[in-house]
Amino acid sequence: MLSQLVITLIESILNQTIKLSPQLHFNLSAIKHKKLQLSIKDWQQDFILLYTGEKFIILTTDEKQADCIICASIETLLKLKDPAKITKLIREGKLDLEGDIQLAQTYSRALSQVDIDWPEQLSHILGDGMSHRVTQGITSLYSQKQKLVEKLKSTTQHTLQDELKIAMHPIELTIFKNDNRQLKSDLELLEHRINVLMQSVI
């Protein structure tokens, strides 16, 4: 369950985003006062996102009481930055949606168009030099994370194929298929010879 402190923090970040990207007010104007309920599988938590026309309000709830209800994992929700993917994710069974799909698409489109110059914003607080170092540090951490994920995938595959022998290596699979075909051919030839021999004996 998400603590109230975390929910308050998310709400604060969203409202700060409105201040830094005023275009959000225009992009969300058509859906103000409409409730978007998010059911996050990873957190086993439901909450309602409401845009009042001036700010965001996040409410926790256990009831299905919104104009649009989305149920998905965090990984899937992050893919909603592209509104065109909503229908695709529904077809793939990764996202459940009830109610007004246009509400979900409007939120997705509006948030995907947020364009904030974070280094510039940080420079007002930290100064140009420190802002540059912080931005570089975050970029470096993200790059290291990507490399770590790729290394983990490679190590897992190697362990399964070469160490634990759980998964068959692609080359081994090719050899196995070829051997299987040859064995089948040999058996057919043997069967033919036996039939010929039986006929000659009779």
Image (spheres, grey):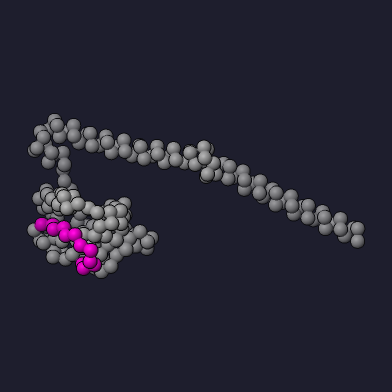
Q: Is residue 24 visible?
A: yes
Residue 135 at x, y = what percent? 20, 36
* Extreme residue in the right direction: 201
At x 10%, y 61%, the residue is 53
The residues colored magenta run 55-67
Q: Nearer the viewer, residue 19 or 58?
A: 58
Q: Is residue 153 left or right of residue 172?
A: left
At x 14%, y 31%, the residue is 130
Residue 73 at x, y = what percent? 31, 55
For the C terminus, the quadrant is bottom right
Write down the quadrant of residue 129 in the picture: top left
Of helix, strand and loop, which mostly describes the magenta segment? loop
Residue 50 at x, y = what percent? 15, 61
Examine the rendered structure and indicate whether residue 190 appears above or below residue 105: above
Examine the rendered structure and indicate whether residue 189 appears above or below residue 103: above
Write down the quadrant of residue 132 in the picture: top left
Write down the quadrant of residue 37 in the picture: bottom left
Q: Is residue 18 visible?
A: no
For the N terminus, the quadrant is bottom left
Residue 145 at x, y = what percent? 31, 38
Q: Is residue 50 left or right of residue 139?
A: left
At x 21%, y 59%, the residue is 47
At x 35%, y 37%, the residue is 147
**Numbered marks: total:** 0
Q: Nearer the viewer, residue 133 or 37?
A: 37
Residue 56 lies in the magenta stretch: yes
